[in-house]
C-alpha cells in the first residue's frame, strides 16, 4: 500500500494478461493510490460481477468504483490476498491541481 496522499506511478501492471483475453488491470502506466485517499464522491459500482472477493474487493473483474456522477473511475482492491490499493482508469480520471514531478 502507498502512504496516504502519495500516488506511486508503476510501469509494471499489477495484473498481466495471459491468453487471448486482456485482463482489466493490464495497462501502464498505473497510478497506485491509498484507498484512504478516496472521498465520499466515490462508491461501489452497481455491477455485482465486479464486486467479488472473500473479505474485501478482489478488483479482478474490471472497474468497481464509480464517481457520484456515474462514471467508472477505477479499481479498488481490498481483499485479503491482494495489496490494498486503488488504481484509476486511464482516460476516465484526471487530477485537479495535480502535477507530475
Image: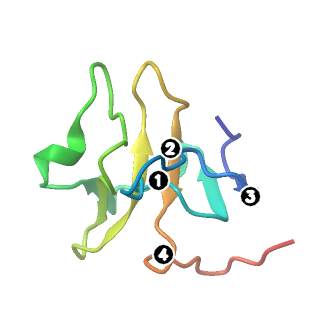
**Relative to 81, 43 lies left or right:** left
Identified at 30% across, 19% down, the residue is 55
Give the Cα distance between marks 1 and 3: 22 Å
- Disc number lying in front (2 or 4): 4
Give the Cα distance between marks 3 and 2: 20 Å
- Disc number lying in front (4 or 3): 3
Q: Do the residues labelled 2 and 1 touch (CB within 8 Å)?
A: yes
**Relative to 91, 48 lies left or right:** left
- Look at mark 2 in the image and give the residue it sits on: 35
The residue closer to the viewer here, 2 or 62, is 62
Identified at 49% across, 50% down, the residue is 17
- Look at mark 1 in the image and give the residue it sits on: 38
Q: How crowded is mark 1: few (under 14 residues within 10 Å), some or many (20 or more)?
A: some
Secondary structure at badge 1 equals loop
Residue furthest to the front: 19
Mark 3 and mark 2 lie on one chain; the one further toward the N terminus is 3
Amino acid at each position: 500500500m502507498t502512504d496516504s496522499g502519495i500516488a506511486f506511478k508503476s510501469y509494471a501492471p499489477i495484473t498481466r494478461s495471459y491468453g487471448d483475453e486482456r485482463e482489466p488491470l493490464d495497462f501502464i502506466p498505473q497510478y497506485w493510490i491509498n484507498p484512504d485517499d478516496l472521498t465520499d464522491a466515490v462508491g461501489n459500482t452497481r455491477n455485482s460481477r465486479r464486486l467479488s472477493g472473500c473479505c474485501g474487493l478482489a478488483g479482478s473483474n474490471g472497474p468497481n468504483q464509480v464517481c457520484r456522477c456515474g462514471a467508472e473511475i477505477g479499481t479498488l482492491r481490498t481483499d485479503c490476498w491482494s495489496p490494498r490499493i486503488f488504481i484509476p482508469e486511464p482516460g476516465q480520471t484526471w487530477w485537479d491541481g495535480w502535477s507530475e514531478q
